[in-house]
Amino acid sequence: QVQLVESGGGLVQPGGSLRLSCAASGTIFSLPVMGWYRQAPGKQRELVATITSTGRPNYADSIKGRFTISRGTAQNTLYLQMNSLKPEDTAVYYCNALLTGRHYWGPGTQVTVSS
């Protein structure tokens, strides 16, 4: 089992920055792939970025150049540095882990970009 908990969401003005964190726990040694997804009101959940255990990132086109995904030295920690935020980035952001073919999700953290 894998438990994921996000933190770092909040209200920020357009052009501002936020850093999301995710801590994973459970009977795991290393998570092969971790990622961030988001869901805006009335929309489907969408991929933001993923990263492998070797540090290879993958980004959605909508956030390339603005967001950076990284993993902590503890490996089972995950970060998302979000810069140049736009109102359309407003959503609940979810941490995700893929292990032995199963997806695990955190409860989500709200990010609101508004003036």
Image (tube, rainbow, N blue to C red):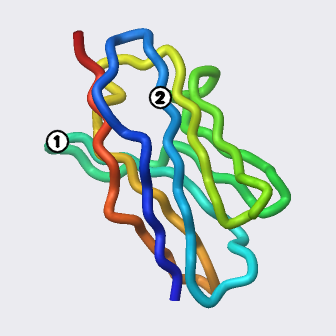
Tell me: residue 99, above or below residue 39: below
Q: Nearer the viewer, residue 104 or 75?
A: 75
Dot 2: element: strand
Whole-percent x, y for residue 34 in the image: 61, 61
- Residue at x 47%, y 28% (from the top left corner): 18
User: Please, what is the three-letter code of the amino acid marked with disc 1?
Assistant: Pro
Residue 41 - label:
1
User: Please, what is the three-letter code of the amino acid marked with disc 2?
Assistant: Leu
User: Which is nearer the N-term, disc 1 or disc 2?
Assistant: 2
Whole-percent x, y for residue 1 in the image: 51, 89
Q: Is residue 16 left or right of residue 45?
A: right
Q: Quadrant of residue 64?
A: top right
- Where the C terminus falls, by quadrant? top left
Tell me: residue 61, above or below residue 102: above
Tell me: residue 19, above or below residue 21: above
Residue 18 - label:
2
- Residue at x 74%, y 82% (from the top left corner): 29
Pointer 1: residues within 10 angstroms few (<14), some, or many (20+)?
few
Contact (Cβ within 8 Å) of mark 1 with mark 2: no
Whole-percent x, y for residue 7 in the image: 42, 49
Q: How far separated are the C-alphas under marks 1 and 2?
A: 20 Å
